[in-house]
Image (spheres, rainbow, N blue to C red):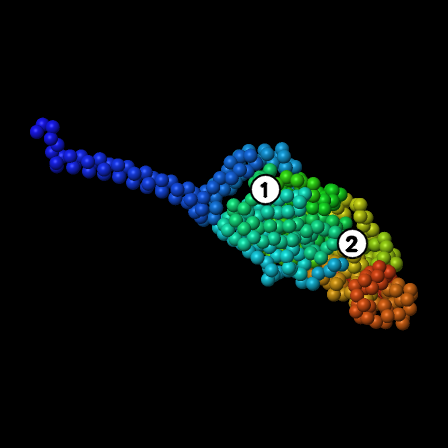
Amino acid sequence: MGGEMKPGRGLRTWAQRHLNVTFAVGFLLVLLTYLVVSRQLAVAAPGGAASRVVAGKQVVVRDAGDNAEGASKRRQEWQPKQAAAEEEETSGAVPTEEEESYPKRDEADGKPSAEAETTTTTTSKAVCNTDGPVSETCDLDGDVRTNGSALSVTFVPASPSERREWKVRPYSRRTMVGVDRVTVTRLGSPDDPAAPCAVAHSVPGVLFALGGLTGNYWHDFSDVLMPLYAASRRYGGEVLFLVSNMQPWWLGKYEAVVRRLSRYDAVDLDRDARVRCFRRLTVGLRLHKELGVAPELTAPDRLTTADFTAFLRETYALQRGAPAAVPTTEGRKPRLMLIHRAHYRRFVNVPEITRAAEAAGFEVAVASPRGDAPVEETARAVNSCDALLGVHGAGLTNAVFLPPGAVLIQVVPYGRLERMARRDFGDPAEDMGLRYLEYSVSAEESTLLEMLGPEHPVIRDPDSVHRSGWDKVAEYYLGKQDVRIDVDRFAPTLAQAMDHLRHRHQ
């Protein structure tokens, strides 16, 4: 009896052991399931975090869906604390002290075209427009990587999307030959292979091209400086320029402007083989309008052409923000600068024009702008004047340095060029806050009449020349014509200029 097992106790012991084993196995299955699901969530969940290697360091990159509270932390996580020092040592972007300081267009592209595409999440956005009438641009926010020597930009999306590729000419005129396009690729997934970062930048970047029509004074401002101002002024100098078709002489000529827009040395993109990473990059410059900035295209800052000219006055420390009173307290007459071109479209009777302007009440300074003259020197000379007079041409670009309220007088050569003249200088002058006056040359005031005779189509029928194409218009009306002003006919225009200066102070 003593060795006999009691049925009730033995059954309970066996069942207890069986239940213990079952519980242990179940617990292990639950734990394993939890670990698998947790790993999947860490990789795929919108609010999750995944690690990536940037410049040899592991940093956390949060995907779309993070809340607003983590926005500042995300920026810190993208850019390690040592990144500023790394940029200084390896990127060529060295901080500096802020200085205190045809192709002709149709219409400026005011809205994204049908080909423009936007990819957006909470933290990632790509907007590309390669079908505008003037410019090609991409605005990229998120994980952006550049390879300069390959002229390529890779955008890593925050979530799966259609893979796309755009070709962007980074010069402000999309039809410009001799400027290579940049390939912008949006990957299809955050997990698609992308070149690792060699340099991670904490500041935004603007990628643009020189070359093209740079070297022509008007195009320097209209095609590059004004679009660059519109694209970068919002950053207050904390932006890096990446330049293809690098022209060191150009950057030297406009150094004061470029340095004030960016505190960092520009990167020679064509010779830069390292992969640079940005959280924001603009590819290409947008030409808003000829020699102008459109506020509707610079939201939320709503910058204007007048803002740009004020920026120039600050940059070059120009003293005058308004023309002189008439008469001046010192007894000085208002000063008029007469632009005397060295070749075609010259005034051939400068002494007569000078005497007529003096008779109208002006003190006259005759200037022959030189291409190698320092911009600072030209800016100071023009800013000291109250009116600027010249035949249609690049020299009138110096109107950007006139004090607001001053007068610009454009002499339009013979040949029905008024529309072009108005677009290139008239509308911009008014946007600058200047009084714009226009004087159209008659056939009798053009040297083409002496050269070709009254029956030549260039004289008799300018419309037929326009119908034959731009080449003929440029050849004759811009390339072979000089001007002999009829001072009696011109006198009312000079009187209008003086009246404006006189009345604006009353």
* Rendered image: mark on residue 395: 2
N-terminal-most mark, 1 or 2 = 1
Residue lying furthest left: 1
Q: Position of residue 31 (x, y in %)?
A: 34, 39
Q: Position of residue 425 (x, y in %)?
A: 73, 59
Q: Tell me if residue 427 comes above or below residue 315 in the rendering.
A: below
Q: Quadrant of the C terminus?
A: bottom right
Q: Residue at x 77, y 55 (%)?
A: 394
Whether residue 208 sits left or right of residue 51 in the image: it is right
Q: CA distance from mark 1 to mark 2?
A: 47 Å
Q: Quadrant of the N terminus?
A: top left
Q: Residue at x 76, y 59 (%)?
A: 102
Q: Residue at x 65, y 37 (%)?
A: 92
For the residue labelled by badge 1, is the local secondary structure a helix, a strand or a loop? loop
Crowd around label 2: few <14 · some 14–19 · many ≥20 (10 Å): many
Give the residue at mark 1.
195
Q: In front here: 248 or 388?
A: 248
Q: Is residue 31 visible?
A: yes
Q: Position of residue 496 (x, y in %)?
A: 75, 63
Q: How many marks?
A: 2
Hey, what amino acid is under mark 1? Ala
Q: In front here: 170 or 363?
A: 170
For the residue labelled by badge 2, is the local secondary structure a helix, a strand or a loop? helix
Q: In front here: 47 or 396?
A: 47
Whether residue 83 sits left or right of residue 247 in the image: it is left
Q: Position of residue 121 (x, y in %)?
A: 49, 52
Q: Residue at x 65, y 53 (%)?
A: 167
Crowd around label 1: few <14 · some 14–19 · many ≥20 (10 Å): few
